[in-house]
Amino acid sequence: MQESAGMDDRFGALSEQLAYHILSFLNVDDLGRLMLVSRRCKSLCVSVPCLTVDNRNYTHNLISRQLFNNFVDKFLVLRANSGTKTRHFTLVWSFRGCRCDLNKKRKKGDNSSDVEESLVYKWLLEVSGAGAERVSINMVSQEGRPNLFPSCVLWSESVKDLTFCSNNCVWEFPRSFDMLFPSELESLTLQSARIPDKFFNDAVSELCSLKSLYLYGCSGLKGICILRSSLKQLKIINEKPVDLCHLDVSGLKLEKIFLTWYPADYSRTSFQITCPALQDFVWYGYPMTFYYSTGKWKHLQCAALYLTLPPGSEVASFSKHDVHYVLPSLEKSKFLRLHAETIEVLFKLGHLTGELDAVRNLAIDYCILTDDQVPIVASFLKMVSCLETFYLTSSPTIVRGSCKDQKLEVAVPLKGYGFDVEYWERQELKFVDQLRKATVEVQGEEGNDVELVKYILKHARGLEYLTIVFAPSLASIIPEHLTSFLKPSIKLNFSLKPQN
């Protein structure tokens, strides 16, 4: 019987490392139940290095809330007494429905506005001060009164990765940020947070070890100034219009920048960037009133530009914007990706001039290659003469923030089929001379994109590989249309487009 029971104890037979991995998916209340099963389960639950505290199942009444709070407090004390270090601490906490315990007398000198808030911040202070390396905080503040931002986590000497999500709730930030202790924080992620300018800029300047900074859907910031020599990655994503109008980024080690930035007031915006080591640069947004970048980015490997005009705006209103500096700053990029709509904006503003000789790999995203866009795309292709690979891929139009109703709008494209092979031949495009590989996604059995494929097959002398992507409904049509243009030296590959 004992042997049979031992064979059925599959969890008890697991190695400590594998058991810890399984327990890392459990909430703290589940660990509390599991630790009652056996001595080994208790030992594992108390010593598990990854801990999640989530109170969302205990907010329906004050009694269950208080019981859960007391349990978490005792459980953390038990872990501290056993010498357990929480390497990864996840806190998911809602203060909604929380009330002060009016019957409990507060200690003299205790100025905290809420007992539960003080308790939660005590946990964060203890965990971050006891060797935690990764801390993830997802909080919802009380109705009618903002909670304090837990700045203590930023002061930790052990926390290297911090994620804070406030679910668009209002939080009370200090007017300024003063580092009490040297911080070892390397990665900071702020999501759905309303942050004052001074606190943010002061905090970033004080975090001397910061290497990665990510802002997702953050509001309240009107100007960001990042002067951080240690920073290597910066990502700012705001798909809806925001108050952010000015961005100044300077970093000697900064290698990657990803921006999705649609200013609500696009009439007075500025973007300054000083990053000599930049390797990857992606920018979705509107043209800036003032754009400045120092020197040529000699180390630039990949650049993607998705600039469009705000909904309802006219091209003439951007005639004085510094759009003409954008494309030249990317000319050293080895791989350049543009949207056809971005090329159209640059063309209408008269900024498709010069040459992009360093670009070896080019990708153009489009919805449908319309008759209006073909001459514009042709003008741009004249700027690139040393291409080795070329991609013309179908994608949705650029997602644009609507200033009218704060929603995202997507334009509906028109069909295009008015430009044949002879038109492309008259353009005398030099990029086909060195072209080795190409991928083109076609929308129908006939169209401007199909004619471009025929031109490439006919005139790209050194072409080795060509991939044609199309819908399954065109599987028997597209190959037949292109076979007569195929050369023996070209390896032609037909690929079916996945259906949504």
Image (spheres, grey):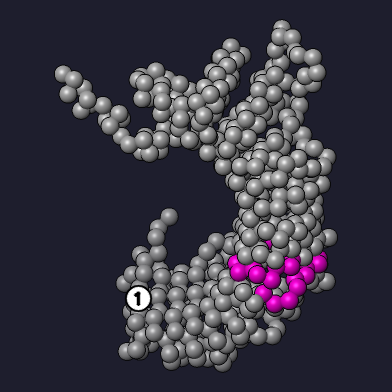
Left/right placement of residue 83 relative to residue 1 reads right
Residue range in magenta is 273-297
Q: Is residue 311 visible?
A: no
Task: Check the picture and name the quadrant holding the C terminus.
Answer: bottom left
Q: Position of residue 171 (x, y in %)?
A: 74, 34
Judge from the rendering whether residue 26 lies leftward or rightward of residue 258; answer left or right. Answer: left
Q: Residue at x 82, y 47 (%)?
A: 198
The residue located at (82%, 42%) in the rendering is 176
Q: Residue at x 62, y 59 (%)?
A: 233
Whole-percent x and y of residue 234? 65, 57
Closest to the observer, 121 or 495: 121
The outermost residue toward the top is: 103
Q: Mark 1: which secondary structure? A: strand
Q: Is residue 333 visible?
A: yes
Which corner quadrant holds the N terminus? top left
Residue in the foreground of this view, choosing between 223 and 180? 180
- Above or below — where is 417 with respect to 80? below
Where residue 189 appears, x then y in whole percent?
63, 47
Identify the image quadrant of residue 491.
Answer: bottom left
Give 287 or 65, whichever is nearer the viewer. 65
Q: Which residue is mark 1?
A: 493
* Residue 412, horizontal then vertical, whole percent: 59, 61
Q: Residue at x 26, y 26 (%)?
A: 9
Q: In this rendering, is residue 170 above or below 81? A: below
* Amino acid type shown at disc 1: Asn
Q: Is 245 displayed left or right of 332 in the figure?
A: right
